[in-house]
Amino acid sequence: MDDYGVGSITRTEAYVYDGNQIVPRFADDDAAALTPSDLRNRYLWGPAVDQLLAEENVAWYYAPGTVDWALSDHQHTVRDWVRSSGGSTTLADHAQYDAFGNRLDAPTVDSLFGYTGRYHDDDTGLQWNGSSQGGGRWYDSATGRWLSEDAIGFRGDASNLYRYVENRATIFVDPSGMEREGEHKPLGDLAAALEGIAKSEKCKAEARQIAGAIQNSWDHNWRASAPWRQTVKGYWCYEWAYGFEGAFKLESSGDCFKVETGGVAAGDDPDGPVHAWIKIISTETGQSVYVDDGFAYSDRSQVHTVPPIPGGYGPREWWPTHNPRKDCNIPKAYPYVPPKPKEPPPPPAPHRSTIFGPVTPEEIYQIRPYRGPTA
């Protein structure tokens, strides 16, 4: 690295990756080649993405150093560093960030990682969100935006190609720089997704009813169909889109949400493959959730915060006129069924004694005359 911009190397650093995570860090404050004695840090990672557990600061490569344990929040942003050294444990640093990841106080622990557990470059003030195998983007917390455009352009359903996680930085993270974590979820998460884009309690309640109707319709429809491998539970994706739309209309008041059908085609053949979905839009926030039949992704996720476009599809849109309702076998829409209230537990049975006979809890401490053994 050229710290002073004079055209000469002033220090050298190297990182060794295990998958997408840095495990050891080597550094030397001169231009000499790195050796094992230049080991400066070792990192311990958890099973979740960017879940940093601990960082060891190595003074000499064969001697143990101080260990800083990372205490992170729901986004894996390190909020506290707890230092273990010489048999004692102390709070070494407490970090405060604003909504978009700007550090609000002076750090007392020098670490590569902080906001959302990603690598932060102190020289530029930028954060790298990407993979060690290539792909990713630099994020600038000072402006709250990416430095480069979204790789898939406007197919990401965003009018601003530099916007960071749809400006919902307190909810989402984007470790790869390409896709928000949690963009694709199972159908069982639809209620939470719709509640997340609603504001009022009335609309949150309606969100649960709409999600219940769609789930109920999904659970109760199945038919034999050919070609089976190109359908899901016997229905084409556009037939499911019409079915989900019908379930939505059973529970929607029209005040909280609206629904649209949409999709994309593969290639220019009007009769070629397509993929369709419904888009549920909150009238309170303007935010949306997409629901499909799970065909787009290998994990069969059905709830999405971006259009579920399969690989090789688009940008040509699918229009419902290509597959009109009259030509479709539309799954039957089922209404939301509220859960049955839990029945109160039965009263406790009387205690039974072989000497005194049945004894209720109220009588258990009362003195009673001996009546002989019970039958």
Image (cartoon, helix red, strand yellow):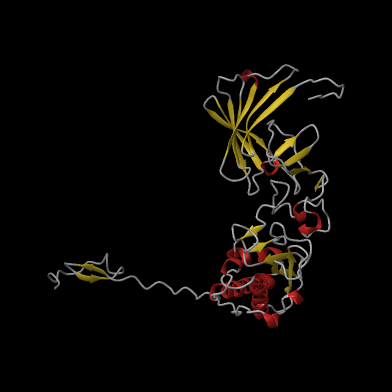
Residue at the farthest bottom position: 326
Q: Is residue 175 left or right of residue 340?
A: right
* Rendering coords of residue 76 (x, y %): 64, 45
Which residue appears at 37% of the width and 73% of the height? 346
Res 324 quadrant in image: bottom right
Q: Which residue is nearer to you in this view: 373 or 90?
A: 90
> Could you tell me which quadrant the C terminus lies in?
bottom left
Res 343 quadrant in image: bottom left
Q: Is residue 192 left or right of residue 121?
A: left
Q: Is residue 320 left or right of residue 64?
A: right
* Rendering coords of residue 267 (x, y %): 76, 62
Res 9 quadrant in image: top right
* Above or below: residue 10 compared with residue 155: above
Which residue appears at 23% of the width and 68% of the height? 352
> Could you tell me which quadrant the N terminus lies in?
top right
* Rendering coords of residue 340 (x, y %): 50, 76
* Rendering coords of residue 90 (x, y %): 59, 32
